[in-house]
Amino acid sequence: MLEDLFCYQTVRERHRNAPFFEERERYLDYKAAQGCVHETVIRIARELLCIARSFGGQGHLPLQVTAKEIERHAGEWAKSQCSSGRARNPWWPRRYFTDQATDWFRFLGLLFEEAAKPPWFSGYLEAFTRFMQSERGLSPKTISTRGWHLNEFLGWLEPPPPNICSIRTTDIDRFLKSLAARGWCRVSIADSASALRAFFRYAASRGWCTPEVADSIQSPRLFHEENVPFGPSWEALKVLIESTDTHHPVDIRDRAILQLFAVYGLRCSEVANLRLDQIDWDHDRMCVRRSKQRRSAVYPLVATVGNAMLAYLRTVRPSRSAHREVFLTVKAPIKPLSAGALYHAVSKRMNRLGIRSVKRGPHALRHACATQLLADGLTLKEIGDHLGHASVTATGVYAKVDLAHLRQVATFNFGGEL
């Protein structure tokens, strides 16, 4: 590894003769295998040299290293950097020393990390999760969302109550009001209230609280047209995709991602979980595992989308990766893109281009896809099948934005029948 990193023999000897050479060498090989670029591995090697010298006073690695010990050595290192004029402020050298030392000792299995104490409500949350899985048969996405809302509420309570029975309706009302103060919209607050209502109904069935708690949870008023989908126009969507027509690795990757959202109307989790074996290049087909319906749907692979994905796979995605997901991070550590990362990638581009849309992120492109299909004359049933809706009711909302047909209905001459 040293021969690949440093040109001068004196520099190699300096690293080789420092303490814990084999341990540092193994860690550098590991970071390179993770996808770290050459310059990053060099920077890590230099920092490890300083860390090894700092911890090498006894001539052998300690059996255990605590976070406090790392902080102490980092403080001494930062102080020496400032006194020698190599750093103006101790903050950055201390932080970088701490981060690299923590990762290195964790890799070696020497870092002592105290197990985080589970929150007081962990038992209730686990029982509720098992109930949703085994008795209700809810989708993993619904279970995850409800668990997240419940974790937000129970973790918000201060001081923590001794049990669920001690929670009052006023506590829930104050929590929902705090969500509004944090900028949550009414729909999101209503989702939180619905998740809490489901939990307290379950809690009442277990005898943890009275049934009145769930019955008294009030959601914010939602208007009938509140869920009208307002995504970007189709022309704006074309501008968004064309903005990725560059040779930059991130743009090449995001071009394929944006087209999957726009052409197929896929959900965020469906793109994040798309795997290499789900694409049949021989027959130009793509199999998508629907996150809500828990079944697969097969789509023809449109040429433009297929070409964008091929460009990403050939020029950007690492050819050797243990991950089977299609879309990975560009910077090390190389790992699959999360749903949150996909949302950030889309919303950031929309904001940069000034694209106007009530909805933001990948779901806005899903709305734009459905609206365009409706304008092209597809029926609500066909659009629902394309989007993976379980019922026509979920697709019916798009009829509200079909202004051309709504105007035809408004001007229709009923010939005096009314």
Image: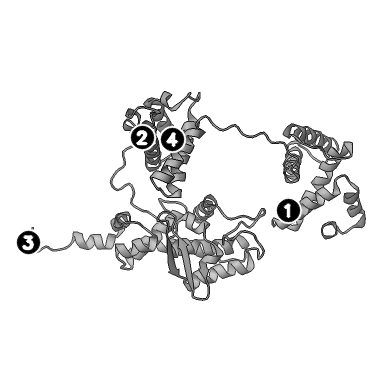
Pointers 3 and 4 in contact (C-beta within 8 Å): no
Q: What is the secondary structure assignment of the residue under circle 2?
A: helix
Q: Residue drawn at (42%, 23%), measured in percent from left and top?
A: 166
Q: Residue 155 at what x, y percent from top left?
A: 50, 32
Asked if disc 3 and disc 1 are in contact, CB closer than 8 Å, the reply is: no
Mark toward the viewer: 3 or 4: 4
| Residue mark closest to the camera, 3 vs 1 | 1
Image quadrant in which you'd find residue 98:
top right
Q: Earlier in the sequence, mark 3 or mark 1?
A: 1
Q: Which residue is mark 3?
A: 416
Give me the residue at 62% from left, 66% from top.
247
- Which picture quadrant has residue 376? bottom left
At mark 1, the secondary structure is helix
Q: Which residue is mark 4?
A: 179
Q: Position of residue 355 (x, y in %)?
A: 46, 55
CA distance for labels 2 and 3: 53 Å
